[in-house]
């Protein structure tokens, strides 16, 4: 394989990975939106949403931590890859 062919192959792989990253970010945003809606429903629905107060509080804490972790990760990925937040 010539240097030129190798560079073209690497450029194609980079473009493929960029597409994969954009799809992964979009999927993550969809999951985060669903998780955010679930948190909101649990908070508004009161503690009837779980068998016990302790379980309810733990569910909310876990969901909020997951959502915060995703938001932090998404911001880091966007900054690292200079992604624009135009429906990626």
Image (spheres, rainbow, N blue to C red):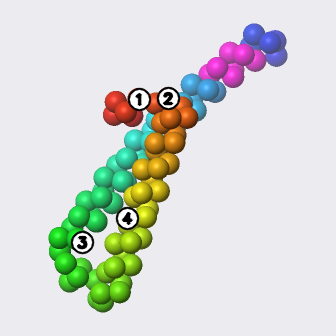
Point out which mark residue 39 bears. Answer: none
Residue 37 sits inside the magenta stretch? no
* Residue 34 to residue 81: above or below: below
Q: Residue at x 38, y 67 (%)?
A: 63
* Residue 69 to residue 5: above or below: below
* Quadrant where the N terminus is found in the figure: top right
Q: Residue at x 64, y 27 (%)?
A: 13
Q: Residue at x 39, y 78 (%)?
A: 58
- Residue annotated with mark 3: 42
- Residue annotated with mark 4: 64
Residue 15: percent from left, percent from top: 57, 25
Q: Give the CA separation, mark 4 to mark 1.
A: 25 Å
Residue 87: percent from left, percent from top: 33, 34
Mark earlier in primary sequence (3, 1):
3
For the record, the magenta segment spans 6-12
Q: Residues within 10 Å of mark 4 (few under 14, many from 20)?
A: some
Q: Are the residues flagged by discs 2 and 4 in contact, CB closer than 8 Å?
A: no
Q: Are the residues flagged by discs 3 and 4 in contact, CB closer than 8 Å?
A: no
Residue 70: percent from left, percent from top: 45, 53
In this rendering, position of residue 13 left or right of residue 48? right
Magenta stretch, main secondary structure class: helix
Q: Give the CA separation, mark 2 to mark 1.
A: 6 Å
Residue 49: percent from left, percent from top: 24, 80
Q: Are the residues flagged by discs 2 and 1 in contact, CB closer than 8 Å?
A: yes
In this rendering, position of residue 19 left or right of residue 59? right
Could one spot residue 78 in this view of the protein? yes
Farthest-out residue, bottom: 52
Of marks 3 and 4, the one in the foreground: 4
């Amino acid at each position: 394989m010539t240097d030129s062919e190798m560079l073209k192959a690497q450029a194609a792989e980079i473009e493929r990975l960029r597409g994969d990253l954009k799809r992964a970010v979009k999927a993550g945003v969809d999951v985060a939106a669903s998780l955010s809606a679930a948190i909101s429903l649990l908070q508004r629905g009161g503690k009837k949403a779980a068998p016990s107060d302790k379980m309810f509080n733990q569910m909310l804490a876990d969901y909020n931590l997951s959502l915060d972790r995703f938001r932090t990760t998404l911001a880091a990925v966007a900054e690292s890859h200079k992604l624009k937040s135009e429906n990626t």
